[in-house]
Image (cartoon, rainbow, N blue to C red):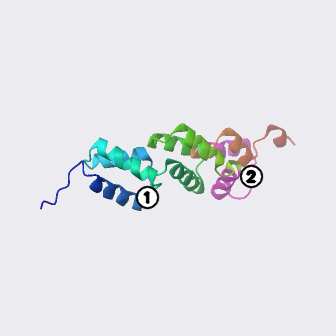
Amino acid sequence: MGGRTSSHDSGAIRAAAVALLARRDYLTVELQQRLHSQGFDPTATAAVIAELTAGRLLEDARFVERFVASRAGRGQGPRRIAMDLRSRGASEALIQAAIQAGPDWDAVAREVRRRKFGPEPPGSWPEKARQGRFLQYRGFSSDHIRAATGADFEDSRT
């Protein structure tokens, strides 16, 4: 017997897919691309992925929810997280649902600002702008940045 398996062997495809999933979660698209890059037949791979999805071993919604939670925990904002998910092939509907169900983004932005710049809110406009640029780079919207830096026109004039 040879040690080589056929690119159409669903058992080999399933074993490779489960081995990959044991290490980390994948989006359906990512797993499919990974298996194709290993030389497996696209049609046979699609059938195995359908089985894994039906058996709930592969769930795009679960992946996206965990991804959002993980990246928010690292201090990334919703815009950057959504961009990363789009580049991985996640559907827009799943991305929006997970972002909306995610953490309190204002609180995440405040915590990221506090960890980077300390507990005191920025006092001057140049400092608010500097901290705002940092938060913008991290993927927070202008509303989140205003909440985190206190950059409110009425409040700063008093």
> Which marked residue is nearer to the observer: mark 2 or mark 1?
1
The residue tagged 2 is 121
Residue 21 seen in the current view: yes
Residue 33 seen in the current view: no
Depth check, front residue: 62 or 73: 62
Residue 24: numbered disc:
1
Depth check, front residue: 88 or 13: 13
Q: Which residues are magenta?
A: 107-133
Q: Main secondary structure of the magenta part?
A: helix
Kind of element beneath mark 2: loop
Image quarter of residue 29? top left
At label 1, which amino acid type do we have? Arg
Kind of element beneath mark 1: loop
> Is tag 2's residue or tag 1's residue first in the polypeptide sequence?
1
Query: Residue most toward the right?
Result: 158
At label 2, which amino acid type do we have? Pro
Left or right of 74 in this view: 158: right
Please tell me how crowded label 1 is: few (under 14), some (14-19), or many (20+) other residues with Cα within 10 Å.
Answer: few
Tell me the CA gap for discs 2 and 1: 38 Å
